[in-house]
Image (spheres, coloured by chain):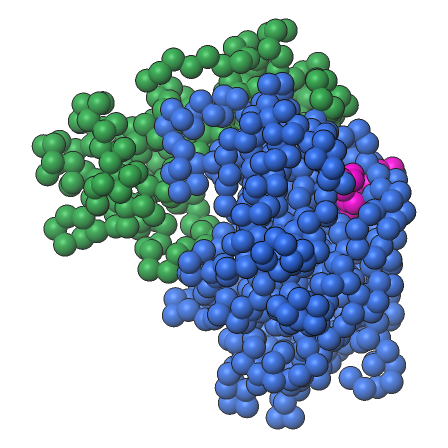
Chain colours: A blue, B green
Amino acid sequence: MANSRDTVTHHAVHSQDHRHNDLNHRKYEDDADVCIVGAGAAGGVLAYELSKSGLKVVIIEAGPFWNPQTDFASDELSMTRLGWQDTRLVSGNDPLQLGHNNSGKGVGGGTTHFTGVFLRFHESDFRTRSEDGVGEDWPIRYEDLAPYYDKIEKDIAVSGPKHFPWGSFHGPYPYPEREPLSANAEIFRIGCEKLGIRSVVAPLAINSAPFDGRPPCINRGFCNQGCLPNAKFSTLIHHIPKAIQHGAEVISDSMVTQIQTNEDGRVTGVTFVHEGKTYKQKARIVILANFVVETPRLLLHSANARFPDGLANSSGWVGKAIMPHSSNDVYGIFPEEIRLYKGTPVLATTQDFYETDSTRGFARGYTLHAHGSRPVEMAKSISKGAKLWGSDLRKAMLDYNFYGRITLVGEVLPDPANRVTLAEEKDEYDMPLAHVSFSYGENDKRLINHAVAKMNEIIQAAGGIPAFVTDDTAHLMGGCRMGNDPQTSVTNGYGQTHDIPNLFVAGASLFVTSGGGNPTNTVMALAARTADYIVEQSKRQEL
Amino acid sequence: MPEYEPHYPRFDVMREEENWDPHTREIVTKRLKNESFYPYRYLTQHEGDTLFRLCAILLDDARSPVLAYVVFHFDSTLQAGIGEAQRKIGVPKQSELIRDGLALLDQVCTERHGNRFISMEESDQRRFVGQLVRGEIGLSSGGRQVPVREWINKILTEAVAAYYSHPSIWSEIGYAGPAYPRGYVRSELGLTDPWEARRDGK
């Protein structure tokens, strides 16, 4: 271990009262009930709920077990490491930006660096085929998830407005809405009000008052770089420590490379690599919570004689229909200083454009957020593709403090051609790299054009001049979608794979459609529902 | 190079370093220790010098302490061999892309201008970089080539990331920088905390 302050706290095994640097002291090497791959939003919830129920849980995480106080910093460049930086090959008409943009590596996964926006999907999100003739219906309805949304929001004390005007849940949230706002959120709300667009203070997984030994937010503004005061929720500081208290074991810095199956076609555990050495973890149940790219990659790479096309892939749908959100930004310049660095990045939101409106010429809809930005993010986004460079870029950035910004979170319709496959090139574990292909469809493009026009209007109504529109995507969903038909989906409505009853998928990979809002609340609610199902099935000895 | 007039000529973000957490302070102050940038661990001296000039043009700023950090960022990123997050199919690995592109830059400049890039007149360098950005010139010679758009975009993106991470640039644009443990108290429109950049220069 080098300088202890500048490097990650490096233990490999974390269980109650014990932390070890090696893998010779494992708690459940041969007798785990559940092995969860990935300690992010979904894996964290599952680890907590399943260990609380008395099951022996092992969570294997590819990245480190961060210590926020010594590993996080108020700095954009150094904190890109919170994202999954391992190379993926990208293609298509709109190749995706991955890494810090939409993934996490390390305990907490993406929750260590998400903005904390905590929205529910709407009823219509689960029935896009029936209601709008696009996408596909989910095998579950909003009512199936509603109690789990309630539970998750209460468990982590989501802050939000007394009245939330859209969807089926109208508040109040467990904790009061955040205040004060940032200048960027204020001008967004002023612009919306002038245009008759309703807006609210965003529901956030960020403390507005002390909760569970954690302080309220201090408006430092570095949500995407890891929260130093622990005011923002992450599974790193909430679910995982509680899971450990309930007996779970976390194995960090360990990359799962293979899922093992037996002659009966059931999974028996996983193989993982820690510091160049290969180990095995046996388990009665394996849950893949390793996100939209790595879950299909691992399933495909685990192909064997019995499952030649990869595990859980008799439908051929493993890796198919991945969806980002369209997330174009509009920067507007204002006569007064906005200072995009101050305060929680997203503090104000509208969902007035969320539901399908047949007069707009496209199906489905979107959310708009007032969205702060630090200098590196802004400069990188306005210079992308060398659209701005040299003196134009430098001049624009000298006015950094005078820019406001609005960001789109737009629904992207599922298309099986947008998919994760295995590439020829191999990584350090001798695993084929993931190849991620993505192109927007016509509906997606029309939605983006509508949203960009709307963002321009809001900026103008607030007294600003639209200056830069940047193409971007956020989040990633799908790739192992749930469904009732085993021929066109990978899992049932609980995330249990159709082909292998003791193999589950959790997290954003299960999404059938993308919705038009930030996905983390839905990811965690789905995980909590899967946990209940596994506990019930285990009690009845059906797993 | 045009004259620039920053809004906050007297603001210095480093005046507040005592108020930052130790980890952040260590990371940021390292960017000011130019002597620690050398010798390069991955780049050759000539590659470093070429990147210095190229980035000076792409960022329109030739101030040596800042540009030296930008080049150091390339050197340490390439040396660390961390992943690229994403790479377009068919594009060479980052390390090969940058290195081969720099070599081809010199070859093409020699063919067209009789000099390697860093030995060209500054005005010629600027014109040449403009042509590369606009895709008017390819980087191919002697049967070898690199995808010029990917190459220039990669260099611009990394240069921008490092440049806007340098505290001198934070000061220049009036970015108040690290904010832990104190956070912001006055975040609303028109309000500033006492340590933030103010146009009246106080």
Would you place residue A117 above or below residue A375 in this image? Answer: below
Residue at 85% across, 54% down: A169
Question: Where, by quadrant of the figure, is residue A430 drawn?
Answer: bottom left
Viewer-nearest residue: A207 or A29: A207
Screen quadrant of the N terminus of chain B? top left
In front of the other: A361 or A248: A361
**Horizontal side of residue B21 vs A398, given as left or right:** right
Q: Position of residue A45 (x, y in %)?
A: 77, 61
For the C terminus of chain B, the image quarter is top right
The x, y position of residue A301, in whole percent, is 51, 75
Residue located at (65% from left, 29% from top): A461
Bounds of the magenta segment: A199-209
Q: Quadrant of residue A538?
A: bottom right
Tell me the residue at 66%/28% (across/down): A462
In this rendering, the answer to whether A486 lies above or below A454 is below
Q: Is residue A206 visible?
A: yes
Residue A418 x/y as whole percent = 50, 66
Residue A46 counted in the magenta span: no
